[in-house]
Image (cartoon, rainbow, N blue to C red):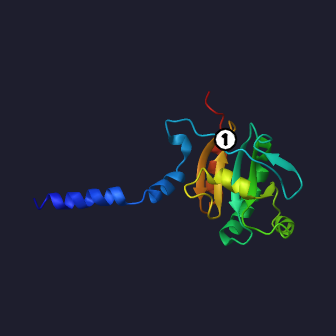
Amino acid sequence: MQPIRPILIAAALAITTPALPILAADAAKPVQNTAIKAPLAPEFSAKSVQGSSISSRTLAGKGYIVNFFGSWCPYCRKEIPDMVALQQKYEKQGFTFVGMAFQDNEKTMPDFIWQNNINFPVVMADAVIRNGFGQKVPGGVRSVPTLFAINRDGRLIEVITGARTKEEFESIILETLKKPAR
């Protein structure tokens, strides 16, 4: 009977171990690699800090990355020059970044945008936007940077928490611009 005890302990641990780390790891994997069609991206509508209206409807047919960031976040600040360069490179091909300022100061955001030469729309991420995108991440959007990559078909193809290199951003952008399979 002694050999059964380790099996019972292992089974008990497997049953009682929280699944959140597994879910969090799965959230960072590309959705398009599954056999199931990627889910639709969350719908949103807002006025950018720069004054233009932006929504999932105005972005229909484009590839885009919704990037939750904070002006107070050193990792986010480090990504901005790469995002600005890639926005300039891919905008004419139908791509855009959408910055979602997370727990940030609306009064100082225009200066932050100007100081960093941000050339894509930036929205103050209110509770409705945070909750809409947060439903796609186990535990919601709790840290920055967190990005949501959406393809031309309006489908969420990738969710990543953590900083990206220019090369990683570019690879994701190219995935958003692929023509969807019909």
Q: Quadrant of the C terminus?
A: top right
> What is the quadrant of residue 12 in the picture?
bottom left
- Residue position marked by numbered label 1 in the rendering: 151
Q: Looking at the image, is 5 positioned above or below residue 136?
A: below
Q: Residues within 10 Å of mark 1 (few under 14, many from 20)?
A: many
Q: Looking at the image, is 32 positioned above or below residue 121?
A: above
> What is the quadrant of residue 80 in the picture?
bottom right
The x and y percentages for residue 23 are: 48, 54
> Which residue shows up at 72% across the image and 72% down it?
72
Q: Looking at the image, is 159 positioned above or below residue 144?
A: above
Q: Is residue 52 left or right of residue 155?
A: right
The x and y percentages for residue 176 are: 66, 43
Q: Quadrant of the N terminus?
A: bottom left
Which residue is nearer to you in this view: 29 or 9? Answer: 9
Q: Is residue 160 left or right of residue 129?
A: left
Which residue is nearer to you in this view: 15 or 55? Answer: 15
The x and y percentages for residue 94 are: 76, 41
Q: How many marks?
A: 1
| Residue farthest along the left direction in this orientation | 1
Which residue is nearer to you in this view: 14 or 160? Answer: 14
Amino acid type, callout 1:
Asn
The x and y percentages for residue 89 are: 76, 50
> Which residue shows up at 45% across the image and 55% down it?
22
Mark 1 element type? loop
| Residue farthest along the right direction in this orientation | 51
> Which residue shows up at 62% across the image and 63% down it?
142
> Which residue shows up at 69% across the image and 63% down it?
79
